Amino acid sequence: MAGKVDWAGFINKIYEAFDKKVNDMVYAAVMAAGDKVLPTSQFTKTGSLDKDKLITLVEDVQTANGVEAVIMGTKTALSKLNALSDTQWISNSMKEERHTTGRLGIWEGIRLVEIPQSFAPNDTSKKLVANDVLLVMPVADNKFIKIYDEGEAQVKEVSDGNTNMDKTIEYEYQQKMGVATVIQRKFGFYKNIA
C-alpha cells in the first residue's frame, strides 16, 4: 500500500524494463526496414489494400527468394484481408476459425502470421507496431534485424544502507547495445492499408 517493493522485485522490474526496451527497438527496426529493400517500387506498396497488388507482392517475394512467403501483421492489419475475400464459398471450419481468431489463418493459399502489438513506454495511447502495415516475409533464414552488444554489462549496486549519507540503496545497470537492419533477402511491405 505504501508503494514499497522488495529488492528482488526491484531488480526484476529492471530486467523487465530492459527486455521491453530491446523488444521495442526491434519492433521499430522492423517497421523501418521496408524502405531498405530495393527496388522499393517493386517490394514496397502503399495505399488502399488491393488484392491483385498484394498477391503480386507475395509472388515477387517468393520468386526473389525461391521459398514460400507468409503475410505478417497485427491482428487489426490481418483482419483487413477478410474484406478482400468472398466468404460465400468457405467451409464451416474456416468460418469457425474466423469467428474464434478474428481472421482467416490462410488467405488465398498464403499463410498469415500475427505480430503481437506493443505500447510505447508509459503511453498506452501510442502503439509501436503499425496497424496499417502488412509484411510479406520469406519462410527462410531471414534474420535481418541485428542486435549488437558491446562488452559486458556493468552493475553498480549499493545495498548496505551505510555507503550513502542518506542511507539509500542503489542499483544501476549499464550496457552498450543497439539494433541495426541488414537486408539479406527480399521481403515486401504494404503500407497505409485501409
Image (cartoon, grey):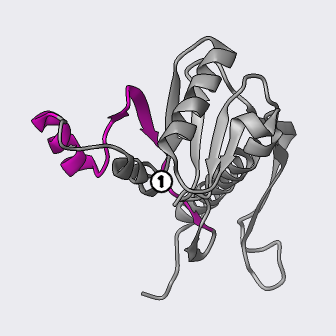
Location of residue 141 by image quarter: top right
Q: Is residue 21 above or below residue 166?
A: above
* Residue at the extreme left of the image, as rendered: 92
Residue 96 drawn in magenta: yes
Q: Nearer the viewer, residue 189 or 194?
A: 194
Extent of the magenta region: 91-120
Identity of the residue drawn at 58% across and 52% down = 133
Identified by mark 1, the residue type is: Ala
Location of residue 179 by image quarter: top right
Q: Is residue 77 above or below residue 36?
A: below
Q: Nearer the viewer, residue 134 or 84?
A: 84
Q: Is residue 102 above or below residue 110?
A: below
Q: Is residue 55 above or below residue 104?
A: above
The quarter of the image holding the N terminus is bottom left
* Residue at the extreme front of the image, as rendered: 52
Location of residue 162 by image quarter: bottom right
Asked if residue 46 lies left or right of residue 86, the reply is right
Q: Position of residue 21 (x, y in %)?
A: 68, 56
Identity of the residue drawn at 48% across and 41% down = 51
Asked if residue 85 lies left or right of residue 14, the reply is left
Q: Position of residue 36 (x, y in %)?
A: 82, 39
Identity of the residue drawn at 73% across and 22% down = 185
Q: Position of residue 28 (x, y in %)?
A: 71, 53
Q: Nearer the viewer, residue 157 or 9?
A: 9
Question: Secondary structure under badge 1?
Answer: helix
Q: Which residue is mark 1?
A: 77
Q: Position of residue 139 (x, y in %)?
A: 55, 21
